[in-house]
Amino acid sequence: MSKSAKKAVFVCQQCGREALKWLGRCPDCQQWNTFVETVVTPAASARPLSPLEPPRERSRVTLQDADRSPLPIAEFNRVLGGGIVSGSLALISGDPGIGKSTLLLQAAAAMAGDKSTVIYITGEETLHQIKLRAERLGLDGEGLFLLAETDLEIIQHQIEQLSPRLVVIDSIQTVSSPELEAAPGSITQVRECTLKLMRQAKLSNVPVFIAGHVTKDGSIAGPRVLEHIVDVVLYLEGEPFSAYRLLRCIKNRFGSTNEVGIFEMKEKGLIEVSNPSLAFLSQRGRDAIVQMSRLVEQFLDVLDYHFVGWAV
Ligand SMILES: Nc1ncnc2c1ncn2[C@@H]1O[C@H](COP(=O)(O)OP(=O)(O)OP(=O)(O)O)[C@@H](O)[C@H]1O
Ligand SMILES: [Mg+2]
Ligand SMILES: [Zn+2]
């Protein structure tokens, strides 16, 4: 690539805003000291998805183009709108330690089998760690391929070779493309790698799940920019000291965002809670007691009033 094709700009690491000079405060997200000088090569995103594909008349676009494969984890499947859409890119994010890798490994194993391969790519853990987790969760490894890699070009090549049923990348912040001069983990890397994966997913029809970290202000590190690129955005959430986890969908290009999945984190992984009223009984029980004591107090006040009234 010629030098003239590259340009230096300043990019806000929080929201992706670009500026020609360094700014102390981002006019978009109002964060301080977030601008970093970045050399950008012409974005992959600027290229058309597939230059060889001619436009198709609507009636010629078959239903299989939006094929959904059901995920055998009912709560997860419901949140996805009834299955994994082929060629879709979904982002699963949440706080550190909330259970993203656990849920994704469970989903990967559930989709893998003797006739279907799934590749789980990690840039955060060793293969040994993943294997230990899989053993703890009691997952059968048939059809499940593990790869510890952070180089996007190698990742894309392996996906192409394997042509799996599902790709899991844990996490998008660890992936980087040597083609780009930006530092690994920087917004430019995260955004461009996501765009390249999106393009590959669409061209090959292979669905991709990516895990994303959340920054302290609650946005996805990388950050809001990713939410616009991907097809589906899921959040895994939980209260401190509680084993319950909620899987919420905040964006879905193929379904509604009203569904919530409920899980409990146990030694065997995220176990579906099919009866949420039972799960939240303790909280509701507490609320009921508080409400009852308020009623008793009001009742006593009324009694008090009448008693004083008689006494006078
Ligand atoms: N033996 C166990 N029994 C029950 N829960 C466990 C056990 N081991 C780990 N966990 C739970 O799994 C959580 C870690 O899950 P996981 O690694 O999937 O989270 P993550 O969101 O991927 O984290 P990170 O942000 O570090 O990638 C721990 O915080 C803990 O709640
Ligand atoms: Mg993890
Ligand atoms: Zn900003």
Image (tube, rainbow, N blue to C red):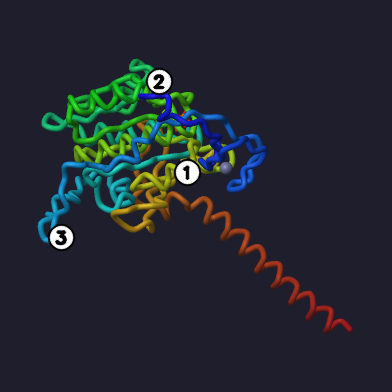
Mark 2: amino acid: Glu
Around disc 2, counting alpha carbons within 10 Å, would you say few (fewer than 14), some (14 to 19), or many (20 or more)? some
Screen quadrant of the C terminus: bottom right
Q: Earlier in the sequence, mark 2 or mark 3?
A: 3
Residue 177 visible somewhere in the drawing: yes
Q: Secondary structure at mark 1?
A: strand
Screen quadrant of the N terminus: top left
- Depth check, mark 2 against mark 3: the one in front is 3
Vertical side of 311 occupied by 264: above or below: above
Around disc 3, counting alpha carbons within 10 Å, would you say few (fewer than 14), some (14 to 19), or many (20 or more)? few
* Residues marked 2 and 3 touching at CB (< 8 Å): no
Vertical side of 49 occupied by 257: above or below: below
Mark on residue 237?
1
Position of residue 250 in the picture relative to residue 204 (left or right): right
Q: Residue at x 59, y 46 (%)?
A: 29
Report which residue position mark 3 lands on.
Answer: 58
Q: Residue at x 71, y 67 (%)?
A: 297
* Residues marked 2 and 1 touching at CB (< 8 Å): no
Q: Secondary structure at mark 2?
A: loop
Around disc 1, counting alpha carbons within 10 Å, would you say few (fewer than 14), some (14 to 19), or many (20 or more)? some
- Depth check, mark 2 against mark 1: the one in front is 2
Q: Residue at x 40, y 30 (%)?
A: 5
Ligand 2 near label 2 (Cβ, under 8 Å)? yes
Q: Residue at x 63, y 41 (%)?
A: 31
Report which residue position mark 2 lands on.
Answer: 125
Q: Secondary structure at mark 3?
A: helix
Estimate the x, y position of residue 174 in percent, counting from the top left. Answer: 42, 26
